Image: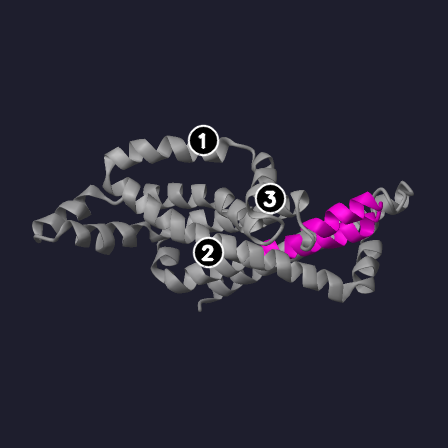
Amino acid sequence: MSETARRTRGSGILLPILGLLAIIGVWWLVTIIFSIQKFLVPSPADVVASFLELPGYLLEQSVVTLAETLEGFALSIVVGVPLALLIVGSRILERTFYPLLLAVNAVPKIAIAPILVVWFGFGQWPKVVLVVLVCVFPIVISTASGMKSTPHELVELLRSLDSSRRQEFFKLRFFHALPQIFVGLKVAISLAVIGAVIAEFVGADAGLGFVIVQSGASADTSLAFAAMSLLAIISITLFYGLAYLERKVLPWAEEHR
């Protein structure tokens, strides 16, 4: 790795940490200067103390939310990528499914959550299904856009070599679309956490969303902030984990950028 690459990667780690510390410092200072009550806005120390009181419980609820997020995200890939391939392969299917996808994406997910509880009960399935509904649209759009953006001269070159439509589809278009697909996946993984929490707000007996609702009902703002901090950690970890996977799977795309 070159010296420039090391510096770039080092700044990519150091700068977010410095930004986070600055935000925490300002937050702490504001609570002190304006003497804000703990039940309104807790200080960072209050949040840490609240987490240390119930570390096992909060981590257990984090595992529940993380499982719902990952299951829904994986299922959205299984549904979204083949649907995008069908849309790209047939203009009739594109005209049929695109308006439906737009309609599903336009409906506020908080309005769908209670219906999912009626259909699937209070178990894990309503959360997983809502995550799929939140994630599938960016995955379909990014995959279809990436496959359609294949350079025309490459398509003509492959056709001149008497390649089949299947070979053109998977060996050229899909391969060329991989960077764009990962863009959609990174958008979707952040939305997946939001979808899981929305579902937990409506009907759940476990998960970080459930903890936030219960904390709000009892005015335990510190515990709610601790749960939200864990949600932020989960979201950041999943996003950068996916970005790391992209660099390993598609090193040529990173070099091209």
- Residue 51 vertical position relative to residue 37 in the rendered view, above or below: below
Pointer 2 residue: 74
User: Residue sitting at 27 percent across and 41 percent down?
Assistant: 88
On the image, the x and y values in percent for residue 220 come to 84, 49
Query: Around disc 3, counting alpha carbons within 10 Å, would you say few (fewer than 14), some (14 to 19), or many (20 or more)?
Result: some
In this rendering, would 36 be left or right of 204? right
In this rendering, would 99 be left or right of 226? left
Query: What segment is highlighted magenta in the picture?
Result: 209-236
Residue 103, which numbered label?
1
Name which residue type carries label 3.
Answer: Val
Location of the N terminus by quadrant is bottom left
Estimate the spatial distance between the alpha carbons at disc 2 and disc 1, rounded to whole Å: 22 Å
Q: Quadrant of residue 255?
A: bottom left
Q: In this orientation, which residue lies closer to the viewer: 157 or 168?
A: 168
State whether residue 218 appears in this view.
yes
Helix, strand or loop for disc 1:
helix
